[in-house]
Amino acid sequence: AIGTNALDAGTTITDSVAIGRDSLTATTVNRNTAVGYAAMRGTTTGTGTALGYAALLSNTTGTANVAIGGGTSTQDSALRDNTTGSNNTAVGVASLANNTTASFNNAVGYQALYSNTTGSDLVGIGSSALYNNTTGTRNVALGNNALNAVTTGTNNTGLGDRALRDNTGSNNTAVGSDALLVNTTGTLNTAVGSFVLDANVTGIENTAVGYASLSANTG
């Protein structure tokens, strides 16, 4: 332990590393690695890794979490609000910052999955990917601002910068930059290629393949 109050309350400690003021200050700490101010401060269980200012700050019994990223305040900390969620990976400033009890999420990039609270089985890779997702499940976003607006929608896949950016519905697939860009409540749409169905708003059950195909369709 290195740093003021690091591991200072530990009574049962096994295979743990704490570097930084107020890191890993709980009484029972096993097999955790915390580097940074207040990293994993309240954790009482094991097998977690936190690297960055206040990363995994609120974690209590969540296990097998990895949080890498921190800024100048706790608002920027990866997995900051996680308490009991397990098997989450957050890499990037403010990634999965609001996650509380959700598990099996992967966020890579600045503010990826930032707003998620209880949604599980999510993948957000890219700056602000799945930024507004709160309780939606089984969504996959790969690309900057991909699936940025979805909150409670499920089973969406957006691959490409801004793919399904404005989407709030479910069961849509977009592959390509700006594919299904402004889709909001439309469902069961498939768009493959850049700018495909990029003007679709509420249309349902559309399938378009090829650069800019059905670009003028609004639904």
Image (cartoon, grey):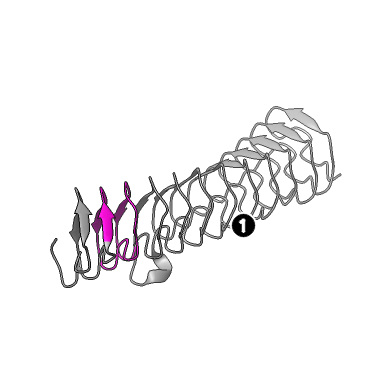
Q: Is residue 208 magenta?
A: no
Where is residue 64? Give x, y as percent: 38, 45
Looking at the rendered image, the quarter that the N terminus falls into is: bottom left
**SS at mark 1?**
loop
Query: Residue 20 lies in what quarter of the image?
Result: bottom left
Where is residue 31? Give x, y as percent: 25, 47
Q: Is residue 2 left or right of residue 199?
A: left
> What is the total number of numbered labels drawn onto the structure image?
1
By secondary structure, the bulk of the magenta-drawn segment is best described as loop
Front in this rendered view, residue 135 or 16 = 16
Looking at the rendered image, the quarter that the C terminus falls into is: top right
Q: Residue at x 60, y 58 (%)?
A: 132
Residue type, mark 1 in image = Thr
Q: Residue at x 82, y 33 (%)?
A: 206
Which stretch did the figure color magenta?
28-54
Q: Give above or below for 17 relative to 207.
A: below
Where is residue 86? Give x, y as percent: 45, 48
Identify residue for label 1. Answer: 134
Query: Seen from this angle, which residue lies furthest left?
Result: 2
Query: Residue 25 lies in what quarter of the image?
Result: bottom left
Q: Residue at x 48, y 47 (%)?
A: 126
